[in-house]
Image (tube, rainbow, N blue to C red):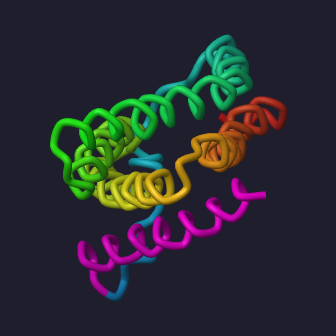
Amino acid sequence: MFGFLWLFVLYIPFVIAVIATMFLLYGVDFVDHFQTVFAGDIEGAAFSRPRWLMWFAAVVSLIFPFLNAPIEELMYRGYAQTVFRKYYSKLWVAILIPAIGFALQHIMLAASVQGAFIYAVAFFVWGAGSGLIYYKQKRLFPLIICHFIVNIAFSVFPIIFLVFNIY
């Protein structure tokens, strides 16, 4: 149940970070820029994706949540945070550095430069929140469950696109 609680606790600041960063970049009409920022220039993409690539994406999407969530949580919270806490004896360093790494890792998912900046801010907030939760709770499994739920939700889209022939 903690996994679902942490999903709620982490997702709210994540969404606020996305919206606040969009607002800072685009002002009051930030809503008009979501497609360009998060999907890229769809109209300018004049290439067709081969069907085998979509099937490959679907297979990877099925495997991804099962491997990614435990590996990232073990690496960033279980290992890195513990090591930085041991060597620097400062909690903020132990949480800050892995959160920066977590954010930088996720910018490669962005479809635009603006998206990369927004991802960096939002995933930093998620990473710092996860770091605080791990420090307080001393348990990785609920964070792995939370991370898995997020990953599975986003991994379903390539499969849906394949089934409905949307690509």
Please say if 160 is above or below 91: above
Asked which quadrant contains residue 111, the reply is: top left
Question: Is residue 35 left or right of 162 when viewed as pictured?
Answer: left
Residue placed at 45% from the left, 65% from the top? 34
Residue found at the far left of this picture: 88
Q: Which quadrant of the view contains residue 107?
A: top left
On the image, the x and y values in percent for residue 151 come to 63, 41
**Which residue is depicted at the point 29% across and 33% down?**
83
Taking the view exactly as shown, the residue that stands out farthest to the right is 163
Is residue 20 magenta-colored? yes
Position in image of residue 104 (x %, y %): 28, 41
Q: Residue 72: percent from the left, percent from the top?
A: 48, 32
Q: Quadrant of the N terminus?
A: bottom right
Would you say the magenta stretch is mainly helix, strand or loop?
Answer: helix
Outermost residue to the top: 52
Left or right of 114: which side holds 56? right
Task: Write the residue at 23% across / 58% down.
Answer: 92
Magenta stretch, residue numbers = 1-27
Q: Does 59 sit above or below residue 126?
A: above
Magenta-drawn stretch contains 113: no
The answer to whether 36 appears left or right of 96 in the picture is right
* Residue drawn 60% across the image and 47% down it: 143
Picture layout, residue 136 above or below residue 28? above
Position of the C terminus by quadrant: top right
Q: Nearer the viewer, residue 25 or 126?
A: 126
Quarter of the image holding residue 117?
Answer: bottom left
